[in-house]
């Protein structure tokens, strides 16, 4: 009887322990948001978002010395409207002649109309019977067609500003007086994709030569199935591609990351660790996880780690040429001391004798990742070229998410390929200070899309 009661009490204790763990896990899930976890801001609902930046890091308002911009008067206005006074003085009736004037200028859009250029290839017949004919330009292939500037505008609106095909037609009708069909819009997007395929491959090769590259990936539905958009980005280059898989198989079949041998900044996704290159972790992700531990778990060591990482970032900004060896070693020793304090408060669960790893708390798991990945976390202190965060790659992920919010999904494989190829080119142009629409126009005119780019 006593043995049965003891067994029952033991079972109840185990059940209570499991329920306590489950309750803690559910509370943790409810407490997570975009400021203290990897959850996207869109999952926050209507709650007020909170930045990880502390007050005083950047001044509010305009930056001193920033050159503003405003409308400037034109020396050659297209239209002049004269507003003459009455020809007679309102006071005494004397006849008046206009003297000086004040001028005000109004900048406005022209009336919506497309310019039509007709190309005529003349023929001439020689007395010997030979017929000789002028040649049409290579880009003029049909009896009636849209020009390079119009094609560039369609690609620009759909692939950079994320407008759907139907709304693109409506906008062009309002601004240009013509409404291209949805099929025409899609055809022009495909033309742009074909012209930018070779530059897209060249961008991938150029990224292999960059000293530091950020990598990220995000889910996207293509024909109703989950695919992954893969991003590589540096300060001056961007490259996007798509694959049905997220991890190492995708890296190998896309064929870029396995050949990279320099420093890769990422969020710690395990497949990246299998690549033969140097690694650096995105500290913005770690700061969010540490914020959760400090606020929800009441972990003082997490507060100390946040302070240390932010101090290290500030120190590197004060020394853009790099930290001294003693500074790097001091930061590393303080980093290890903070972790040691965390381990004292959160010893890991001993092995339970069962198969597999013993389940640990999220606090212990974070401590282990910070300890095992210390070199990657602090890589930015040893090399001034390494960034503190992975913002370069994560910024490239945001616009595809906007595209997905507008469209819901990519309906065809070629559509998502066209988006990745065109977006890679446009983002690279933007980073290098090039004008997007004129560059697209030149591409449709047959010029080399990479002309003038630093790759």
Image (spheres, rainbow, N blue to C red):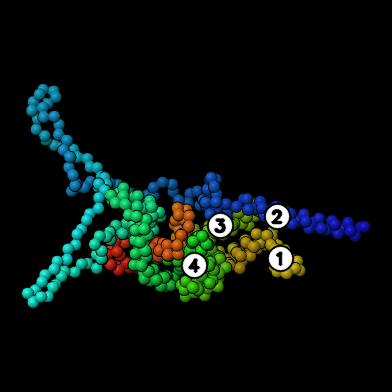
Instruction: Determine whether, in the image, residue 24 is placed left or right of residue 308.
Output: right
In this view, the residue in front, 79 or 321, is: 79
User: Label 4: which residue?
Assistant: 243
Q: Which mark is residue 358?
A: 1
Q: Are marks 1 and 3 in contact (CB under 8 Å)?
A: no
Q: Are marks 1 and 2 in contact (CB under 8 Å)?
A: no
| Pointer 4 local density, CA inside 10 Å: few below 14, some 14–19, many at least 20 | many
| Dot in front, 1 or 2 | 2
Give me the C-alpha separation between circle 1 and circle 4: 34 Å
Instruction: Give the quadrant of the N terminus.
Output: bottom right
Nearer-N-terminus badge (3/2) = 2
Give me the C-alpha separation between circle 4 and circle 2: 36 Å
User: Label 2: which residue?
Assistant: 22
Instruction: Determine whether, in the image, residue 311 is placed left or right of residue 414.
Output: right
Nearer-N-terminus badge (1/3) = 3
- Taking 428 as reference, is 64 above or below it? above
Give me the C-alpha separation between circle 1 and circle 3: 24 Å
Q: Give the residue at x 57% y 52%.
A: 33
Residue 133, percent from left and from top? 15, 70
Nearer-N-terminus badge (3/4) = 3
Nearer-N-terminus badge (1/2) = 2
Q: Residue furthest front?
A: 129
Nearer-N-terminus badge (1/4) = 4
- Taking 100 as reference, is 144 above or below it? below
């Amino acid at each position: 009887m006593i043995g049965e009661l003891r067994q029952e009490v033991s079972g109840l204790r185990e059940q209570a322990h499991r329920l306590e763990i489950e309750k803690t896990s559910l509370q943790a899930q409810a407490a997570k948001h975009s400021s203290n976890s990897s959850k996207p801001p869109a999952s926050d609902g209507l709650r007020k978002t909170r930045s990880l930046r502390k007050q005083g890091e950047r001044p509010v308002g305009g930056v001193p010395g920033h050159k503003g911009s405003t409308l400037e008067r034109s020396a050659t206005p297209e239209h002049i409207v004269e507003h003459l006074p009455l020809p007679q003085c309102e006071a005494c009736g004397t006849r008046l002649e206009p003297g000086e004037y004040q001028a005000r200028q109004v900048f406005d859009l022209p009336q919506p109309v497309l310019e039509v250029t007709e190309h005529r290839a003349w023929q001439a017949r020689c007395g010997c019977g030979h017929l000789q004919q002028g040649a049409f330009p290579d880009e003029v292939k049909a009896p009636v067609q849209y020009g390079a500037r119009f094609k560039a505008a369609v690609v620009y609106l759909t692939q950079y500003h994320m407008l759907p095909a139907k709304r693109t037609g409506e906008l062009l009708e309002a601004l240009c007086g013509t409404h291209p069909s949805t099929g025409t819009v899609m055809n022009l997007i495909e033309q742009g994709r074909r012209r930018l395929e070779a530059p897209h491959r060249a961008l991938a090769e150029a990224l292999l030569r960059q000293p530091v590259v950020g990598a990220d990936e995000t889910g996207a539905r293509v024909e109703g199935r989950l695919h992954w958009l893969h991003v590589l980005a540096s300060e001056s280059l961007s490259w996007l591609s798509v694959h049905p898989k997220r991890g190492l198989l995708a890296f190998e079949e896309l064929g870029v990351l396995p050949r990279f041998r320099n420093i890769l900044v990422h969020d710690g996704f395990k497949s990246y660790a299998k690549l033969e290159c140097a690694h650096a972790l995105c500290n913005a992700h770690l700061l969010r996880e540490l914020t959760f531990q400090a606020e929800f778990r009441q972990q003082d060591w997490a507060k100390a780690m946040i302070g240390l990482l932010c101090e290290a970032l500030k120190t590197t900004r004060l020394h853009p040429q790099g930290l001294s060896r003693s500074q790097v070693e001091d930061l590393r020793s303080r980093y290890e001391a903070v972790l040691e304090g965390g381990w004292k408060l959160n010893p890991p669960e001993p092995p339970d004798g069962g198969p597999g790893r013993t389940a640990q708390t999220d606090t212990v798991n974070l401590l282990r990742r910070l300890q095992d990945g210390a070199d990657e976390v602090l890589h930015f202190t040893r090399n001034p070229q390494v960034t503190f965060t992975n913002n370069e790659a994560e910024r490239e992920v945001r616009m595809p998410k906007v595209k997905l919010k507008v469209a819901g999904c990519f309906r065809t494989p070629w559509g998502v390929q066209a988006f990745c190829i065109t977006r890679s080119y446009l983002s690279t142009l933007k980073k290098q200070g090039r004008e997007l629409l004129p560059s697209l126009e030149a591409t449709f005119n047959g010029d080399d899309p990479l002309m003038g780019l630093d790759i």
